[in-house]
Image: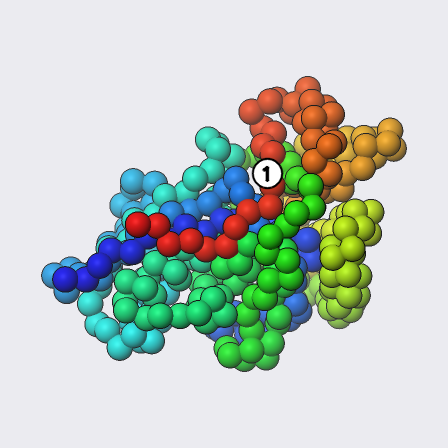
Amino acid sequence: MNAAITARAHTNIALVKYWGKADTDLIIPQTGSLSLTLDQFYTDTTVVFDSSLAADEVSVNGDRLTAQQATKVHNFLDLVRQQASRTSFARVRSVNHVPTAAGLASSASAFAALAGAASRAAGLTLDRTALSRLARRGSGSATRSIFGGFVEWHAGHDDLSSYGVPLQEDVDWPIAVIALVLDPKRKKVSSRQGMQNSVSTSPFYPAWKQIVADDLAAIKPAILARDFTTVGETLESNAMRMHALTLSAWPPYSYFNGDTLAAMQTVKSLRDSGVACYYTLDAGPNLKIFCQAADVTPIQERLAQQFGQANVIVAHPGPGIQFLD
Ligand code: PMV
């Protein structure tokens, strides 16, 4: 009898972004990146391999996916089967724990949890580096969600050399990330499509590679030294320069909406009034605001007043992958 294994992985927010692949099959990035794992948003995934199944069965939040919807999961399970020399299909149950309508469910927590649960259920015993490499094959950002706290993804140059490494797992720095939900809907341009478009058409892409190298060199010592201003300035400029790649691509596009611009102004005016806070955004319109724990209340109140209480969620540094009984 095969055992059912459940793994929990948290999502992460990139402070220095991954935006572009060097190898689209193996998901080897063009540059390194660095993130903070968050405690509020996570995925629990249970996997069992069952020789009586005629195909993989996948459900997310209680809804059974069609074969087409489950293609990425199925392809990922094929990799696990290959590594474990198994042939049987699997039953996968995944539940995203994100506040209602937050629109923050992420492929990072999903593929990190799937990597953990599927590999163990298939009888593999992978260390966290190997798990990180496996998670990478599902979604680039999942590479970092195997670890807690501040995590760097070493770009590497092949399957063996591209994986996440914790910079600081137990974060004892009183910081917070406030997620501001401005549109819970799915993004129109997927990150996969968007980053590929930037790599192949933005004339700024070579400059981006240098920016990431410089930002990584600046942010790592700043995190270890708890230099809040340097970390904040680096993450905000890095996010804006990533988004400049979308505007400079052809055809141009943007993940921002009108509220995104208004919220950026609000963060800036909070900062001008002496409340230190900095924003970042991924492939969507929602802001994540990096601040010190002591400043959460005034920022939260101001954002709630402008965008509604339900759209403001406070998160803190979160843990790496866990296996649940
Ligand atoms: O892993 P993906 O394909 O969801 O891409 C993630 C891209 C960003 O979230 C925008 C940046 C990052 O480093 O997480």
* Quarter of image, res 257: top right
The residue located at (56%, 24%) in the rendering is 310
The answer to whether residue 224 is left or right of residue 29 is right
Give the residue furthest to the left.
52
x and y percentages locating residue 94 in the rendered image: 34, 48
Q: Nearer the viewer, residue 208 or 277?
A: 277
245 is higher (above) or lower (below) than 173: below
Residue corresponding to mark 1: 315
* 276 relative position to 58: left or right: right
Quadrant of the rendering where the N terminus is positioned: bottom left
Residue beneath the point at 60% across and 76% down: 156
The image position of residue 27, as x and y in percent, is: 52, 69
Q: Residue at x 45, y 64 (%)?
A: 135
- Can residue 115 be seen here? The reply is yes
Residue 69 visible to an observer of this rendering: no
Q: Within 10 angstroms of label 1, few (less than 14), some, or many (20 or more) residues?
A: some
Q: Secondary structure at mark 1?
A: strand
Q: Residue at x 29, y 41 (%)?
A: 63
Q: Is mark 1 within 8 Å of ligand 1?
A: no
Estimate the x, y position of residue 121 in percent, counting from the top left. Answer: 28, 62
Q: Quadrant of residue 54?
A: bottom left
Q: Position of residue 69 (x, y in %)?
A: 34, 52
Three-letter residue code for mark 1: Ala
